[in-house]
Amino acid sequence: MPLPKSLKEFFENLKELPQTFQKSFIRHDKPTSDRARSQIIFGNSFLHIFSTRIHRYSLKPKFTFGLGVIAASSFIILIVTGVLLMIYYKPSVELAYDSIKDIQFIVPGGRFIRNVHRWATNVMIISVFLHMARVFYTAAYKRTRQFNWVLGIGLLALTLMMSFTGYLLPWDQLAYWAVTIATNIAASFNELTDALNITEYFDPGSLMKILLLGSKEIGEDALIRFYWLHCIILPIVLVMVLAVHIWRVRKDGGLARPDNIKEKELEGIPKDPLSDKTFNYAPEKTYGLMCIVKGESNAVERGPEQTVSSWPHMMIRIAALFMITFTFICVYAYFVDAPLKEMANPVVPENPAKAPWYFLGLQELVSYSAFMGGVGIPTLALLGLALIPYLDKEKQEIGRWLRNKESRRVAWISFGFSAATVIGMLIFTVSFGWLRNWVPNIPQLVITFINPGTVLVTFFVFWSFYCMAKYKSTRMAAIALFTCFLVAFVILTYFATYHRGPNWDFYWLKSQWPVH
Amino acid sequence: MSSTDQKGHKRDYQIDSENKISRRKFLKLSTIGASITAWTLTMIGLLKFPKPALLPDVSNIFKIGKPEDMPVGTKKIIEDKKVRIVRDGDGIYAVSLICTHLGCIVSKTSKGYQCPCHGSKFNERGDVVAGPAPRGLSWLEVSQLPSGKLVVNAGKKVPAGTKYVV
């Protein structure tokens, strides 16, 4: 008896199930044509933030060093490990420290996951800083990209806030005293209001502190608030800003690149034979950017175009960078444990009580004046950075590392100038002290505004204006100022890491610290 | 409201003239106004949300014992209250050990006090000698209960030099 037709069809469908399922899942052919390669990118909801074609110049390793991808990769690693750590972490003053100990010693793989989380933070911070420097020195913040630079500065601030709220959570000695110091920095606005004697009527400092702590003292409410910031608010904001940041790069037509690219500069970068061709009429070109970008996008009668398909050329590089980042962090995390100090002791701070290395430059500034070092100078620096593209609108080549001799000269001289002033200032402060050592009754307001930190900032600003006048260029002024701040940040961080000991006194070596 | 256009057809709306506002514009403005008001008031209400009306703080007032237990010349540190009690010939006073710079706990040295976090230095009286602290260590109010026990109110500062005369 022959099978009924419907039953036959059913068995046939069953037999074809793997193929039909796959076809319904991936709705394009194998990536053997430009069309299919484009479809992989724009048909995938996760990949379609990228464009389907990428300019060969953007793949040049010595142009970007993959820093943005490394930063984003470490952020993805941080999300995954962070979510894992949340399974065991208990945000309570009594339990937090023990739960970290549990993660460290009892949870299988817990120590490794926590180490990865901690060291990925370091990789993210370093790569974010270097990425910023790359974008600055290649002038990639110009021409329609101004606002994306501002978003980048926002991401830098968010990264630092994420890291800060993160190391508070173990509720160890570092955490407790970091919360103490940070919330008092938030309250340090009353250094100003106190000096003006208006704190009684106008006290935004204390309000900030209460909002952060949920109380006047550090306790359960403070921990929950920082936990909430670290696990919910900051990651959501960071993901959203990051998405816009990447999206806008695409909308600006990919990474910044010079107008005249020589073939020599593209040596060793994969090439699409089709992109060498000059298309004479539109239908000949079978691929597009699939989005409208600023600038001259019409490729007809304009060639060579010098783009390659993003799949596989860009994706394979992103994957490689992710793997390198991940491997590096894993190897490091296998051998080096994340720090965990003694349990929080509200009565005795550590001596010295040092923040993680990336905040030590700030801690050095704070040791001159709480308000200026903790609020004034960082705000000025972030604001100054964010405004660079709006104050330096000079037309110039973008996408090359300090290409003309003059800008390299300014960068090197600024490097020397900044190093000399910062080191000079540190030597001076260590050997002679500051105003209060000479005039014991000096009003606080004078120290708030005239301290080694503000003096350095003043030097840098003057230097920048000098360069502006000398080279008649706002770009040169920007290079001077940016270099000065970068160098100062590095030197201050180094100095506070290695040469500050108990009671924040100066020591050449850690072995000279007094034993107690 | 109605008007007649050039061809004599009647219109049931008024074109924006100098003095009168059209219905469309009126509705538009009132909608915008109402939304802005609603959003602003909601936001102001929400802004108060993170600041509880009663802060979960423990009392800052604590007893330190009877004056008889503290002969002239007594100097002691009450660690968990972060305060130093001194009795000299003039009276009894309490000096907070919380650094006025960023809240670390200062430690006693031979010359005075020193902060481990950012290096502020204070003299025996609590005045700033060096470092970033904006003012001297706080002197706290000392009073006496009817029972004779002395009480320190760590929430209430008094001018430096104020001593409780027993």
Image (cartoon, helix red, strand yellow):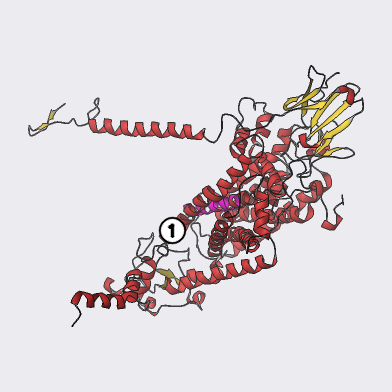
Task: Name above or below for residue A361 compared with residue A260.
Answer: above
Task: Name above or below for residue A44 compared with residue B88.
Answer: below
Extreme residue in the left direction: B8
Quick one: quadrant of the N terminus of chain A?
bottom left
Q: Where are the magenta residues, as a range?
A: A147-161
Amino acid at dot 1: Trp
**Location of residue A189 in the rendering, given as x and y in whole percent from the top left corner:** 64, 35
Task: Name above or below for residue A231 compared with residue A192.
Answer: below
Extreme residue in the top direction: B146
**Location of residue B162 in the rendering, given as x and y in whole percent from the top left corner:** 81, 22
Q: Which residue is mark 1?
A: A247
**Location of residue A501 in the rendering, given as x and y in whole percent from the top left corner:** 80, 51
Q: Quadrant of residue A197?
A: top right
- Disc 1 on helix, strand or loop? helix
Q: Is residue B65 left or right of residue A211?
A: right
Q: How many marks?
A: 1
